[in-house]
Image: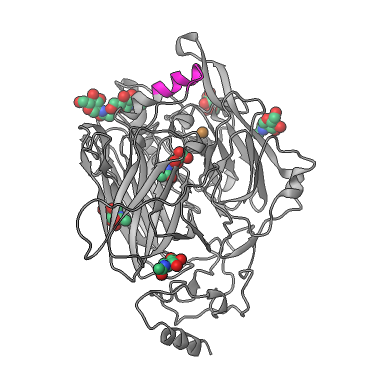
Amino acid sequence: MRFQHLAGLAAFASTSLAETIPFDHILWGTAGPAGNHLQVRATSTTPATSTSTRVADAACTNGPLTRNCWSNGYSVATDFDAKWPTTGKTVSYSLEITNGTCNPDGHGSKPCQLFNGQYPAPVITANWGDTLSITVKNSLTGNGTGIHWHGIRQLGTCPQDGVPGITECPLAPGDTKTYTWKATQFGTTWYHSHYSSQYGEGAFGAIVINGPASANYDVDLGPMVLNDYYYQTSYQLEAIAHQNLQSGKPPPPADNIMVNGTGRSASGSGSYGKVTLTKGKKYRLRLINTSVDNNIRVSLDNHPFQIITADLVPIKPINANWVLLAIGQRYDVIFTANQTVGNYWFRAEVATDCASSNNFYGRSIFSYSGAPSGDPSSSAATQPSGCTDMSPLVPWVRNTVDSTAFVNQVGNLEIDLTVEQTTTNGQNIVFWGVNLTAINVDWNMPTLQYVKEGNTSYPSILNLIEIPNEGTWSYWIIQETAGTKVPIPHPIHLHGHDFYVLGTGSGTFDKSSSPSTLQYDNPIRRDTAILPGNGWLAIGFPTDNPGAWLMHCHIAWHVADGLAVQFLESKSTAPPVDASWETTCSNYQKYSKTAYWQKTDSGL
Ligand SMILES: *[C@@H]1O[C@H](CO)[C@@H](O)[C@H](O)[C@H]1NC(C)=O
Ligand SMILES: *[C@@H]1O[C@H](CO)[C@@H](O)[C@H](O)[C@H]1NC(C)=O
Ligand SMILES: *[C@@H]1O[C@H](CO)[C@@H](O)[C@H](O)[C@H]1NC(C)=O
Ligand SMILES: *[C@@H]1O[C@H](CO)[C@@H](O)[C@H](O)[C@H]1NC(C)=O
Ligand SMILES: *[C@@H]1O[C@H](CO)[C@@H](O)[C@H](O)[C@H]1NC(C)=O
Ligand SMILES: *[C@@H]1O[C@H](CO)[C@@H](O)[C@H](O)[C@H]1NC(C)=O
Ligand SMILES: *[C@@H]1O[C@H](CO)[C@@H](O)[C@H](O)[C@H]1NC(C)=O
Ligand SMILES: [Cu+2]
């Protein structure tokens, strides 16, 4: 029966163009749940529109017409929070961060801190179920470093999360650390330094985990990294952004937007990146916003996008001409090269409605093979407005959040500017606070060290919130304080979990009326969501991953200024640190005693 169905599909596909198959009518799915290592999970059921009995289909292999398949009973319909393949394969990479220069738009060479000398850093590629082993060497002389694998769940591997002051001590100059983690999810994400605003110096790159998808395509074009680019260093900019905040001014605008690490400048220097298309093919493009301060809207002239994932979560495909990416967010999109042979602009523009600004826009060129050379003359689709996440985003695998516990268990986190008495010249300094405290981690005494020593005297400046129990739901309202002087959107990112976005709204969340407006039945789950300016964001996640997990605004200047909390989840069962972890710490402690540069911000 299944095979007949497959054969029918293959026959139906008479051209090379990967049709969008109505997967709901196909008989594949997951083998039964195997994930009893987790104490609690969202209730998972088959996709809402499925009409089939879901059974594993070992014969189903991934190809242009069967992108929903993967292997051995795993498919896009697998609930990856419950089970994932074990390939037994370890994929290794070496990354060396050095103090160099970069000049991606030809405007002029400036200091950069790069992995393997590349801007952006090399793409890390693996398959769903592989183990990654990434050796990072710090060849800077004047900075530590620490690499975070954004969006990677780190199930049971908290010490590999790469957050200085929380999950590790930074790597001292000359030091090396091997990060080891398993790809329990698939899709598109990125890695970056989490050592103050170091990633703004160019220390970031894409991660691609190959796996199934919720729609078909012929060709995977790979990651398309989009980021704001400044002619000053991020250390200079962070200081300016901080000063501006005190006098109520916005941070400096970006000078340019880079599209996959290249682009032209306002003065015409540099060159556009180019992607070549074959007419009739369907393409997958993996959009990643690795900015420090700017939300970006992207579009390809005349080629509407079909969005198939949000962060690392496959969704029911939706169509959009423009895709808005907040910092840290990813969308994988499919488009069809079905237009007249020619050249088309790929546009990456700053979303001014998200309080983002820049001096110049990002462009690259998509060219059909056989097109004459030269810049495109195509024109853009009308841009939408409103700084909200794309919608409707409906996860492919339908999960349900426990609604009964919400009202009793929900916690409140208020985001606002806060004036703190700090040691810096005894001055009052404006910071971003969560409940009026701006986080300030200690690089020499990360949270996992407290856990190891059984020391529970956490300084309040660590913004540490304990979640003692596994197997429960943790719900949070992230609220911009009413009347805040700076009512701007913040991209909120959580480590160690995908959170379910139960709702967002403007004004103040009302504990009596707002809960009834929340969505518990298959809300989008992801790792980064926009907290609207002057509004609230309600999230929930199951506690199934012991460790210390940062939740922060992904605007580099805001997290540097303290906009973060950390959840210490089930410390008694947190994975222990090992001897090499402790060596990293003793090396950094030794270095920091005589370091030329001192820590001047939250450290994140
Ligand atoms: C990078 O090199 C510059 C110029 O030599 C130096 O001033 C700076 O301290 C170095 N930075 C780091 C992090 O090594
Ligand atoms: C990192 O190095 C840069 C110079 O490259 C310097 O401006 C900054 O203060 C250093 N930060 C730390 C914490 O070492
Ligand atoms: C972006 O650059 C990476 C690294 O060179 C490459 O693998 C990828 O295919 C590029 N993306 C596109 C859309 O061309
Ligand atoms: C990236 O995110 C930032 C901040 O959320 C946003 O201002 C910017 O427009 C985004 N860029 C892209 C290309 O989506
Ligand atoms: C091209 O493909 C898009 C879907 O990607 C479709 O909406 C559009 O109608 C197609 N145009 C032509 C000319 O076939
Ligand atoms: C943060 O402050 C709000 C408002 O005062 C309060 O309701 C909430 O409990 C506080 N959250 C935490 C985690 O202390
Ligand atoms: C526990 O941590 C606090 C804050 O860092 C520190 O002052 C104290 O000495 C530590 N206690 C022990 C027993 O090490
Ligand atoms: Cu922010």
Left/right of residue 272 with respect to residue 593 in the rendered view: left
Q: Position of residue 233 (x, y in %)?
A: 31, 28
Residue toward you, 571 or 514: 514
**Residue segment shown in magenta:** 239-249
Q: Position of residue 149 (x, y in %)?
A: 41, 47
390 within the magenta span: no
The residue drawn where x is 78% and y is 43% is: 513
State the quadrant of the C terminus: top left
Left/right of residue 236 with respect to residue 490 in the rendered view: left
Residue toward you, 120 or 55: 120
Q: Quadrant of residue 579?
A: top left
Classified by dominant secondary structure, the portion drawn in magenta counts as helix
Residue 184 seen in this snapshot: no
The residue drawn where x is 38% and y is 75% is: 63
Identify the residue at the far right of this view.
Answer: 512
Q: Position of residue 501 (x, y in %)?
A: 61, 49
Q: Quadrant of residue 145?
A: top left
Q: Quadrant of ligand 6?
A: top right
Q: Position of residue 191 (x, y in %)?
A: 38, 46
Count of labels in the image: 0
Question: Which colour style is shown?
Answer: one colour
The residue drawn where x is 63% and y is 50% is: 470
Residue 83 seen in this snapshot: yes
Residue toward you, 212 or 224: 224
Image: 33 above or below 589? below
